[in-house]
Image (cartoon, grey):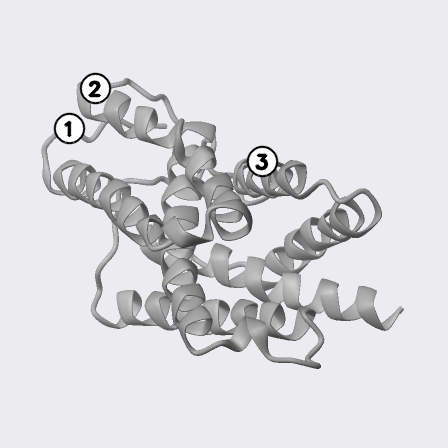
Amino acid sequence: MTQFVLFILFSIIEAFALFYLAFKIFKIDLYPKEMVFATFIMGFFSYFLRHDYNLIYVDITLQYTLAFCFLWMLFRIHPFFASIMVSMAYLAYMFLQSLLYLVMTWVGAFSIEGLDPMIPSYVLQVLSAITGVALGLFIEKKRKGFDFVPDKPDVRVQFSRRDRILFALSLPSLLFVLAIQYFASDLAEFFFLMPFSYAALLYGYMYLSYKKDRGDDEYFGA
């Protein structure tokens, strides 16, 4: 029971930070109660997939899908924009977490004898969440972020070339999210490549989002 409670607690903390970062990046109001509800559901499914069935990659895929579905159906974001939000938020969060994982590996946090192997994982989750929230606060304080995502689902989307490229970048994002688990468990010696991969894809996202935010191709209406 204790293991279940701890897993759900840290899962909620991490997923809450992910949603928080997504909303701050795109300047959308927070919905704390709904965010806690969504993260609890995500944590609940994650626990049983990982601990009862050891389906780690299925769990990661489901978490990504649930985050998209909650943005779309719970937070009422148009599915096109929800796909962009979840992709950019996950990539930003994975970039931060991969850097923290490298630091913790370098200091030997995952190889301490006699230490419960879950403790370093919980520490990584908390540090990632703190860093993600701190980044969100920084974005808000500096008035950064993007304005082009409407906070209503019933918008008419007219795809421009830039929009198609943004959406195309969303398609491989799940593969990059899955890759962090694969490299951490099977190709640890090449894990240092992950932050560079996330940074490269994030740069493309941010460049196109900046151009869209500052350009004259506003394309949504009631």
Q: Rate crowding at label 1 as few (under 14), some (14 to 19) or many (20 or more) other CA atoms within 10 Å.
A: some
Name the one closer to the observer, 2 or 117: 117
**Residue 2 at what x, y percent from top left?**
85, 73
Which amino acid type is marked by label 1? Asp
Disc 3 residue type (three-letter): Thr
Q: Position of residue 64 (x, y in %)?
A: 55, 40
Give the numbered dot on residue 143: none
Please tell me whether mark 1 sits on a helix, a strand or a loop.
loop
Image quadrant where residue 75 sits: top right
The CA span between labels 1 and 2 is: 8 Å
Q: Nearer the viewer, mark 2 or mark 3?
A: 3
> Which secondary structure, mark 2?
loop
Front in this rendered view, residue 114 or 76 = 114
| Residue occupying the point 71% across, 81% down | 114
Which residue is at a point 40% across and 53% down the rendered structure image?
Answer: 189
Q: Which residue is mark 3?
A: 65
Discs 1, 2 touching: Cβ within 8 Å: yes
CA gap, disc 2 to disc 3? 25 Å
Q: Give the left or right position of residue 171, taking residue 16 as reference.
A: left
Report the residue marked by disc 1. Answer: 217
Residue on which disc 2 sits? 160
Instruction: Specify whether residue 221 is in view.
Output: no
